[in-house]
Image (cartoon, grey):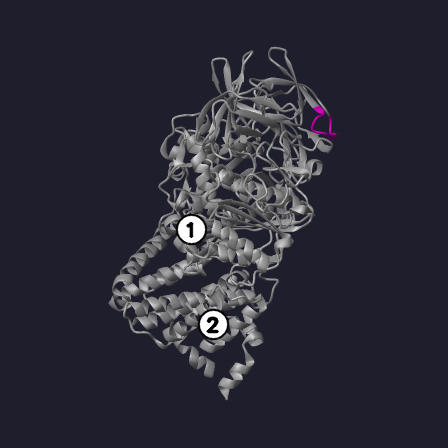
Amino acid sequence: MQKYYNEITAIAGSVVKVTASGVAYDELAAVTTRRGTSLAQVIRLEGDQVSLQVFAGTQGVSTGDRVRFFGKPMQVPFSPNLMGRIFDGAGKPRDNKPELADEPIDIGTPAINPVKRQLPCNMVRTGIPMIDIFNSLVESQKLPIFSVPGEPYNELLARVGLQAEADVIILGGMGLRHDDYLIFRDAFETGGVTSRTIMFIHTAADPVVECLMVPDLCTAVGESFALQGKKVLVLLTDMTAFADALKEVAIIMEQIPSNRGYPGDLYSQLARRYEKAVDLDGAGSMTILAVTTMPGDDVTHPVPDNTGYITEGQFYLRGGHIEPFGSLSRLKQLVNGETRDDHRAIMNACIQLYAGARESTEKKAMGFESSEWDEKLLKYSDLFESRIMDLTVNIPLEEALDRCWNMLADCFEPEETGIRRSIIEKHWPKELAAAEAA
Amino acid sequence: MVTAELEHDVVQNSVAYCCRDDGAKLVSEIIRVRGSQADLQVFEETRGLKVGDEVKFTDEMLSVVLGPGLLGQVYDGLQNPLHEVAEQEGYFLTPGVYLHALPIDTEWEFTPVAKTGQTVSAGETLGTVPEGLFTHRIMVPFGLRGEYTVEKIVGGGEYTVEKEIATLKGKDGQTVEVTMQQTWPVKIPLNVSQTRLLPTDPLVTKIRIIDSLFPIVRGGTYCIPGPFGAGKTVLQQLTSRHADVDIVIVAACGERAGEVVDTIREFPELIDPRTGKTLMERTIIICNTSAMPVAAREASVYTAVTLAEYYRQMGLHVLLLADSTSRWAQAMREVSGRLEEIPGDEAFPAYLESRIAGFYERAGYLRLKDGQTGSVTIGGTVSPAGGNFEEPVTQGTLKVVGAFEGLSRSRSDARKYPSIDPLESWSKYVGILEPSEVVEAKNILRRGNEVHQMMTVVGEEGTTVEDFTIYLKSDFFDSVYLQQNAFDEVDGATDAERQKFVFAKCLEVMRLDFGFDDRDQAREVIVHLADLFRNWNYAATDSDDYKKILTDIDESIATKGGATKEEPEMANA
């Protein structure tokens, strides 16, 4: 049942209005212009006036152009054949391979029933000590990486993708520089994970509306894999570009802006995407790690601020490393008691000592005299920064814990660390202590 | 948002159904009528609706079903039982699926109270059924006006909620058939008793900083504003576990689904020490998490408060925890924006404050017709944008609540939990402690903070020993009394008796004139005392450890901290 209409009555921004009847809200349409055919989505119905958001933008659309309605919402083909493929924000192949003709699934599915969720209990190991030890990533967690533009957030995301244990990796790029897209593609190829990776890439040069579709495409595909029992990891970059696209469209639609021009439903829009992260009772899971660049390093900017209220913690990427303070994984308590008996003790002791070291650094910078304790802390902080915080460090959790013990033994006496005696006795490096005694 | 062409009269705020052409009926509410057009807010995703689709109107306003079987349920914002929905629909919340809120097949053991021929009016008890821990009263429908005569009432026995149990006859001869369930519109306060009492009964939450410094009372209201990550939700979860009330209703409004899952999965396992039953048996969860439709989020807090009011009519004490009212306010903002109303501050509608006030005013302490009392206490979290309290929702809330438990980012960053700011928060209620002593403790905190501010400029060296001692005392009180380890079984929940006792001991320390010689001595003594108190907090009341540490503390106080100095000698002996 396909209908054609060619009475376009208004064109503004990425939105056209067309006179049509029998059209459903959220339905997909195609606008055929001299430049080609673009998909469009119904975003408002007023009598016989249908507002369409045109994915490719309205440049070159003529009032006499033809609109065809599909009678169904936006869909994406779903099958194992998706693995290793790259698509754009409209769901078209980007890798010069044929389109898929598999069973299509709806995007933007209803919410998961909360009683069908279960408490997450599996850690996602990343090989990055700042994550594994201090803020463990947990399966089904939704976690943003708050970053200033210019930090190596995409490299970090790619590394997590390469090293995390996941059955399916889905990368959603929004407003991505073309170079970054190529870097991601090459990284996944060299890393040998392409066969279980699916990419939906919107680059900065693509029409802005397609950017809005990327998170929905990623989570719809991810959700279907999770329902089949797979462990899915969704990587999104950059959600601020997504929010800016929302702002752009909302303003064209003459919606009343609420805060710095962003629409009033920014929270709901972001939450609907992030809340797709889930650990399904009796099936698989979906974990979402998303980059949110903070304009001007301002965490109270509406995008990071709303995100912080939605997600289960956040990683701050600053000065080339993950900040030990401020970064938080709200779910870490669910997993870090099960790994090794010294995990929590190390986590707390190392951070407290490093906090002490910051104070000592400040003290020194202000010209106050450093005590012996300050010197110890400063030595520790140098070691900590180079052996643990450095983003290039890539070791399993157990090795990282051992490394922390050695570092502590290098700098402190056992009782100075504030770690419980029973744990000290078990884990304090013996050879080193013996060497010192001799 | 849908606009419908009217063919006959409609009732403002009544329920309508938008019929999608695949047969699904989406529940909606009339929120504006203009000429022959009505604006409907649809409580579901509107995907798939078409111009020309049929809309069915009803005369009923958006209502909830009240009756035995509510306790222990998990509902969405429109009172759909989520466990039943999951059984029928699987993983997803399919739009247009609505199930009856109460179990229809369960038979309840009914004991009649009213007699044939007796005159009754709305809210009076016709009979009772046992519901878990409570005696659930079956009451004369709240919507009936005037007096009625009981014409017929069934004898004791087992009945389902749909079975007729009584027939009432009005003055005008009209008869009403009564079942064990009835409905009530959520946006109209349910209060058939007219006697509202001043709330004075402290509500003990077992969180020391709340009960002692910023108390809340049964029938009162309070709010917890705080930036993200400051511990709002943990605080609400702790309160839902330990609060000294009969029933707790948790309204998860527009927040993370994961947090509700915590409660849904853990409450059926946790035993309430007071009753020996699981916590779930005294809890109702209303969840409309952030991914669920926005319009239903606006309704969800009203659904929750109506259920609370219903149990209040039975002479029970109910606590409603709403997390978060900011999401509820944002839902109003979204709806208002679509109605193209003229926006107020930060695009919130102009009626925001009156809606917030109206909601909190539904709390209260009532004397019922039979002389018993019941209460609804409302505690709402607020999530201000950027953690800045100068925004419309926080400000609108502060005007109408009785207690303000403000969370601060700096305290949570320093891992001082609960991160309620002792300098900014306030409460208009009187709690379990003598008010003058509370003021005394707060003054020490305030002066300690002043000294601390000064010290950041002039350093420790520039502070007198007296001032430094005040700073140490305030830090002592903060760390041993105001901070609490939520994950420790003993320290995580302090009952009222113990709070009074520990507070008195803290005050003893703070009133003591130590007469320190220098700052190092002051620090040593007070740090030692703090360490004793902290370990004391971890010891179960009246355990051997508890008594032993108490002796040490008393000795330390008696010798003005001299105990520390003698310790090496004692060790040698």
x and y percentages locating residue A286 in the rendered image: 61, 49
In percent of the image, x 59 and y 36: which residue is there?
B76
Q: Nearer the viewer, residue A156 or B46?
A: A156
Magenta-highlighted stretch: main secondary structure?
loop
Question: Which chain does tag 1 point to?
Answer: B
Q: Is residue B140 visible?
A: yes
Question: Which chain does tag 2 point to?
Answer: A
Residue B25 found in image quarter: top right
Residue B24 found in image quarter: top right
* B345 sits left or right of B107 in the view: left
Residue B507 found in image quarter: bottom left
Element on which disc 1 rests: loop
Q: Residues within 10 Å of mark 2 (few under 14, many from 20)?
A: some
* B232 sits left or right of A104 in the view: left
Q: Nearer the viewer, residue B562 or A197?
A: A197
Q: Residues within 10 Å of mark 1 (few under 14, many from 20)?
A: many
x and y percentages locating residue A352 in the rendered image: 44, 66
Q: Residue beneath label 2, please?
A: A417
- Closest to the camera, between mark 2 and mark 1, is 2
Element on which disc 2 rests: helix
Direction front: furthest residue: A34
Q: Residue beneath label 1, please?
A: B420
x and y percentages locating residue B157 in the rendered image: 75, 30
* Residue range of the region highlighted in magenta in the rendering: B155-164
